[in-house]
Image: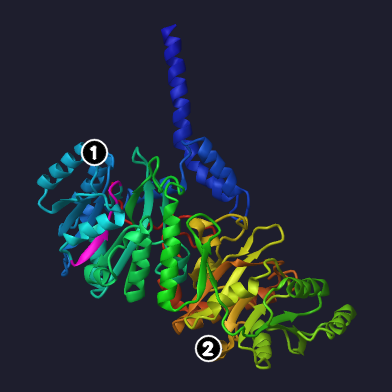
Amino acid sequence: MNEKKNILRRGISLFFRLIKVYILPLFPFFQRILLPASSRWHRRIFCLLRNKFTWIPSEYDRWLKHQSTKKKVDQLPAPMSLQPLISVIMPVYNVRPEWLRAAVDSVRKQSYGNWELCIADDCSTDQALKCLLREIAEQDERIRVRFLEQNIGIAGASNAALAIAHGQFVGLLDNDDELADCALWEVVQVINRQPNIDFIYSDEDKITEKGKRYAPFFKPDFAPDTLRSYNYICHFTVIRQDVLTAAGGFRQDYDGSQDYDLFLRVTERTKRIAHIPKILYHWRSVAGSVGRDGTAKMYAYESAKKALADHLQRQGHKAEVEDGLFLGSYHLKYHIEKQPEVAIIIPSRDKVSLLRQCIDSIISKTTYPRFSIWIVDNNSREKKTFSYYEELKVNDRVRLIRYEKKFNFSSLNNFAVRRIRSDYLLFLNNDTEVVTPEWLEELLGPGQRSDVGAVGCLLCYGNDTVQHGGVIVGIGGVAGHAHKHFFCSENGYFGRLKVVQNLSAVTAACMLVRKSLFDQVGGFTEELSHAFNDVDLCLKMREKGYLIVYTPFARLYHHESISRGFENSSGKRERFVRELRYMKDRWHDVLQQGDPYYNPNLTLMREDFSLKINTITSHVEK
């Protein structure tokens, strides 16, 4: 009997071992191959599976496993020539002792040794915690603790910690979070490469009470419009002390968003900002923390809006700060100065039902008063097209231009622009349909700023999935659309589908550009007759220092490729290859350096912000 039980037990053990060794490793295959990224259901299906069956490995688990095979931080190269003192400041208030100990130990384990830890206890009521703080200070002479006589809040406690800091740079650490072992070493690496750097931030993830890491946030490089939409910088942040002091330190009226307020003020003072695309900070996710529940400190969002309003006033931008499309995001409603005229340029050839739908939606829904519509007819042949043109003659907003050469998107639009005198140009496909009535105001808002080159919108397919949420340079070899095939109702990767942000390019299926700047950069490149002409235009603007902006608050439907067809003939394929080669030659350096608004730890094979598993650039400390 016992022998039979042992056989059964070994059989069951072998069964689960087979699942672990042979079945689970195939899970990513089923996720990525059998359910392609273009499927609008696959993200939800597998998210539900992982929530139900926690033993299913996540993409991040695979990423970390791959990472563990890479070089450890104890094999770092020789010391750098610049080794500044870095003061890590930590406000403390009634934190659980084990989390405080973990936070302090993460500093003591740093592979870079020239640091000091400056702790300000904000009059904690837990006497055992105060004893622990005294014990910690006695264990390492680099740790100093200041006990405040009254509770003054996190901003005041941070200033108290800053007051005892002597370092040239200041790093911010919460009392229950952890730094990666290599965090300070990575920061000093940047300082050695860029000695004049003032502001440094890194990627981050979350860590559970049991120490499991999850929810990695791989961030873009510094993007001012993105920062105005939400505090994507967050952790780990290191600031040159004299810049931090000149900015005024932490302000107590902004508790809960005191770091966001500080980042806005510091980035107003300096553009010497660096992003380390490596996870150097682990944000503790425990009951009652913002890391687990965004509603835990609702007052923080009011503080953030107040900080943004102050920032806009200091920068001379006239705008109202509203809540964004999800908690913790914000929407700036810019005042439109002088109500400039917008010329809407629509190339078209027959397909009159599409054009009629497009024109009707513009005229019936648009709330902005000053616009004109310029239809650029490219060799239409159908009688019903010309009948529709006759109908439009009664509307003095609509003009008709005839372009009688072979279709060339760039040449056609350049031809139209030369005949237009409006201050702003809006390039629009004839297979689009307006959804949001204030779409022109939302595009003009950031578009009227002198530092902005082009503004694009959220384009959705007819089934309410994303066609365009901005353009990422490098995807697929040259460029791809961010969040393609996500549901339009989704927030996207860390909310990026639903916030105004800076990107490298937006599509000319709906793109607002200042006419003077369009002329300055030479308009669309006419060698690019069909593909990449919009990406090329945006990159020419960025080359001159202008920002490209995407906004989800202007939303249209886009019935893509209905009017022109797909690249399915040998001639079309040859043309595409030729234009692909042009982009790779013209923008070789940009493609080599990578898109600054897209993290190098994310894949270039898909448009879904999934992780790049095969090439890992980050260090791991555990």
Q: Amino acid at mark 2?
A: Val
For the point 45% across and 49% down, the residue is 294
Q: Please identify the residue farthest to the top as the structure is shown.
A: 1
Asked if 301 appears above or below 434 in the picture, the reply is above
Magenta run includes residue 540: no
Quarter of the image for residue 138 reads top left
- Amino acid, disc 1: Asp
- What residue occupies the far front of the structure in this picture? 150
Alpha carbon distance from label 1 to label 2? 63 Å
What residue appears at the point 17 percent right and 64 percent down from the top-left corner? 167
Badge 2: residue crowd in 10 Å (few <14, some 14–19, many ≥20): some
Front-lying residue, 289 or 139 = 289
Determine the residue positioned at 50% across, 83% down.
540
- Placement of the N terminus among the 4 image quadrants: top left
Instruction: Read off the residue under disc 1.
Output: 126
Q: Secondary structure at mark 2?
A: loop
- Name which of mark 1 and mark 2 comes first in the sequence: 1
Left or right, 345 with reference to 303: right
Kindly identify which numbered label has been placed on residue 521: 2
The magenta stretch is 168-176
